Amino acid sequence: MNKKKILFILLIVIALLPLAIKSNNFRHIMILFVLFAGLGEAWNIITGYAGQTSFGHAAFFGIGAYTSAVFVWKFGILPWYGLLAGGIIALVVASIVSYPAFKLSGHYFAIATLAIGEIILQVFVSWDYVAGATGIMIPMKERGLLNMQFHPRNKLAYFYIIFALFVFVLIITYLVESSKMGFYLKTIRESHEAARALGINTTRYKLYAMGISAFLTAILGGFYAQYVMYIDPFMVFPLSISMQIVLLTVLGGLGNIFGPIIGAAILIPLSQYTRIIFGGTGMGLDLIIFGLLVVVIACYQPHGLVGLIQNIRQKGVEEDERTPARG
Amino acid sequence: MVAQVITSGLLMGFIYALVAVGLTLTWGVLDIINFAHGEYLMLSMYTAFWLYSLLHLDPLISLPIAAFTLYIIGYLTYKLVVKKVINAPALVALLATFGLSLFFRNTAQFLFSPNSRFINESIVVDKKIELGTIIIGMPKLVASIGSIIMVFVIYYFIEKTRTGKAIKATAQDKATAQLMGINTEKIYALTFGISGAAAGIAGAFMSTFYSIYPESGLMYGLLAFVIVALGGFGNIMGALYGGLIIGLTEALGGYFLGTQFKYAIVFLIYLIVIQFKPKGLFGW
């Protein structure tokens, strides 16, 4: 079975699951799962394929969330335009801030993106135009697809919107990965010097990768704002969002289109269910368990869960090859 | 007034430097980003607090206990967690230490509640020195003098002693260090222990003037990243100068532009400096 077929079957399963299980809690977790899988795919473009570790993707997520929220709240413009505008603004911001940062390598680049993320958070906290630390409450509009507002219990509608956006992100990721640009990015990841020696304009392709990644991240952020209907800077810009994206992608498998899906499928239900089961005490028991599990997974499955699956499949292949030889 | 701000920025800078020295050691020697480093600071502050609250020990007297406790925690971090991920792809170690930081922070919240606690009895509390118009609080002064002494002790240890040279050799080339008969496994564990102890000492000093709560270490952990990157990974003197620059920037930025912008300015300064020195001020 090839990669495309597996991905297609996986998508159908994801699309049908919320229909089969009617619990609203479950559907909410499915929405978050698809959202974060999408964020992981977007982050994978710059870090997994191009090898530039970004710890600042919450900045783009937040820019997307704020743009779509401000569009509805200040101007009464449909959130769909807000999603697109958020993506474009994030793309522009990403190009401006990462151009100087691309001079840096390795950890220095990672810390620079972390710094950029923190600066943007601080700016939004003290920016009066977007209500600073108070946050924005998205006003109620007529329910329907156009306004992206539904009955709060109608999680299915939200799910299929984010699912469609996720498929869009996957298509873009797939196009990037299988194009000439994808090969350029992987060359840059393996050896910056070799890529330059081959005549690849490394800064330009890293910029393209960062721009696409930021654009997609912001669109997903825009959806998030419309879904939760209230945002403040500490919800959409914190380091913990950047880190969650990093965690689930590394956990699933870096630089692999299945990685973020597998990582999010494990991490999001894990964090949500530990919160539902242990979070009621308000004493952080859920995060103690979550933290420990992350440590354990990192220690015992260092190559990501995709690595585990590949190992099993490789063993299977080796055994298949051996069998006819014996006969 | 500006002189006052500069003084207080420099004093904080020395404390930041000690926190960052711990981080730069593990970063330089093991090439691992320890996201739990800020939590070491928090754990040390709680150690000082409980010794004060249960045994009535002055934090400055119980300081060696806090340092030793954090040495052990650092040592165990290596033995139980980092050792297993050290040969994995770089981001996996980060995943592990990030999980660890969540674990430490929330365990503290679970055991000690999220309330802020203060140590209000210590020989330094409520004392101050006046130099003309500049007023220096005794807790901060003692903390920063203690921190600068510790930075130089660690610097001396790394540069001059046999074990320190073994640490440097391991940082430069692990395989060659092993061929020279250095037990790199021991060196790694020791480095993590020293890193914990450095944060432990800084935390014990800070407990005399800073509120103690589960997220105490969060911002200092982030600042330590920036300081280490500013100074160059693995460079102790770089961490010292980086700490001073960040301390000053924070104080002056907060004074001239408002406290809400002080961290934004700190991060901005890092981004500007790194434009001219892409590997930090003292990186190679």
Image: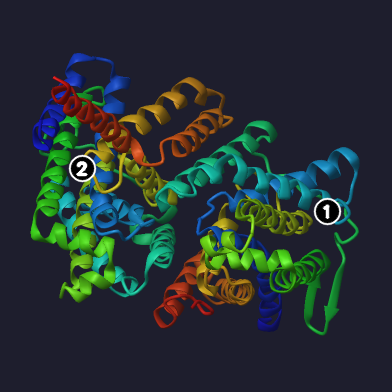
* Residue B60 visible in this rendered orientation of the protein: yes
Q: Mark 1 = which residue?
A: B64
Q: Secondary structure at mark 1?
A: helix
Q: Is residue A160 left or right of residue A59?
A: left
Residue drawn at x 29%, y 39% as measured from the top left: A36
**Quarter of the image that includes the N terminus of chain A:** top left
The residue singled out by tag 2 in the image is A257
Q: Position of residue B106 (x, y in %)?
A: 58, 37
Is A229 left or right of B42, judged from the image as shown?
left
Three-letter amino acid code at disc 1? Pro
Where the C terminus of chain A falls, by quadrant? top left
- SS for callout 2: loop
Give the spatial CA distance, label 1 vs label 2: 50 Å
**Mark 1 touches mark 2? (CB < 8 Å):** no
Q: Residues within 10 Å of mark 2 (few under 14, many from 20)?
A: many
- Front-most of B222 and A13? A13
Q: In the rendered structure, which amino acid carries the disc numbered 2?
A: Ile
Residue A132 sits in quarter:
bottom left
Q: Which mark is residue A245?
A: none
Position of residue A232 measured from the top left corner of the image (x, y, whole percent): 39, 48
| Chain ID at mark 1 | B
- Residue A120 figure quarter: bottom left
Q: What chain does mark 2 sit on?
A: A
Residue B70, image x, y percentages: 72, 48
